[in-house]
Amino acid sequence: MKQEIKNEQINTAVHAPVVAKQRKKLTKSSSIPGWLFASPWIIGLVLFYAFPLFSSIYYSFTTYSILQPGEFVGLENYYKLFNDELFWKSIYNTVYFAVFFVPLSIIIGVALAMMLNMKVKGMAIYRTIFFLPTLVPQVALAVLWMWLLNPGFGLVNSLLDVVGIPGPNWLGSELWSKPSLILMSLWAIGQPVIIYLAGLGDIPNELYEAAEVDGANWFQKTISVTLPLLTPVIFFNLVMGSIGAFQQFTLPYTMTQGQGTPANSLTFYVMYLYDNAFKFFKMGYASAMAWILFVIIMALTAVIFITSKRWVHYQGK
């Protein structure tokens, strides 16, 4: 019996390397079809994402202009940017929009989601109505609001006149142009509202019942139960909203036909980047702007992630 066990151990030791080699061959041969199916996506990733990404790093140190290969100038593009008044103006406009739009979108989005989460007959219709503006293309949205905010015959100023309030020149005033853009953007926050609704549906009813037993009213349940358990969804929308706010482009570009008027109050960072790249063909300059924007967004996202440990609460923790 002992001899048979020893023979089996010897056979196993002898044949183990052979079996391992056969398994490696089978693994390699079985992975080939997978790589072939994934190859179109990999090729697209390299050609349309990786190559332009790393190329833009090099171009940001050159005077490349599409029509000419350009020369290596080191940090000259970055030096010119920091001495460019319109560059700083575009940053101010973008930060102004982000500071006001992102918090307002969260507050209004959560409030709308809580109202649309009520048990009311026909709620599916109300949810559809609030989501519909999201389906409107950005260009059509800009044209619609340009008509609504027209100082002469716009619907908004007409309604204000009814109650005796003189309406401002919304898009023609340096003071009111950015608030007008924020108003337009808030009109189309249906997508975050849907995400908030999903988060509200994930909160267990048992927690509300326990709060009622303790004598909590509606406001106390909202503060103690709803908002803490909704913070993961708020965190997600905060990150996505901040990134989107710093990339604002279509609405102001359409409304001002790329001019950023009045007085460059609607010249946003990405608009100025686009103008340098495709109007003035200063690709090196635009690449430097793109990497500065990348650093700003990465830094902002990192701050949000670091501070989230203090205010984001997950169920079960």
Image (cartoon, helix red, strand yellow):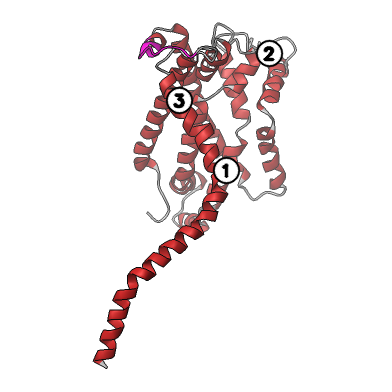
**At label 1, which amino acid type do we have?**
Pro
Indicate the secondary structure of the residue bearing disc 3: helix
N-terminal of the two: label 1 or label 3? Answer: 1
Task: From the top left corner, tell me how far across and down residue 216 is, in percent.
Answer: 46, 50
What amino acid is at disc 2?
Answer: Gly
Rendered position, 13 above or below 57 = below
Rendered residue at 47%/9% (across/down): 86
On the image, numbered disc 1 is attached to which residue? 40
Relative placement, left or right, of 132 versus 295 is right
- Which residue is rendered at x = 44% and y = 62% of the image? 25
Label 3 sits on residue: 55
Residue 147 in sight here: yes
Q: How far is mark 1 from mark 2, CA to CA?
A: 62 Å
**Residues drawn in magenta:** 69-79
Q: Amino acid at mark 3?
A: Ser
Q: Is residue 77 magenta?
A: yes
* Main SS category, magenta section: loop
Nearest to the observer: residue 159 or residue 72? 72
- For the C terminus, the image quarter is bottom left
**Extreme residue in the bottom direction:** 1
The residue labelled by disc 2 is 164
Horizontal side of 257 relative to 73 (left or right) equals right
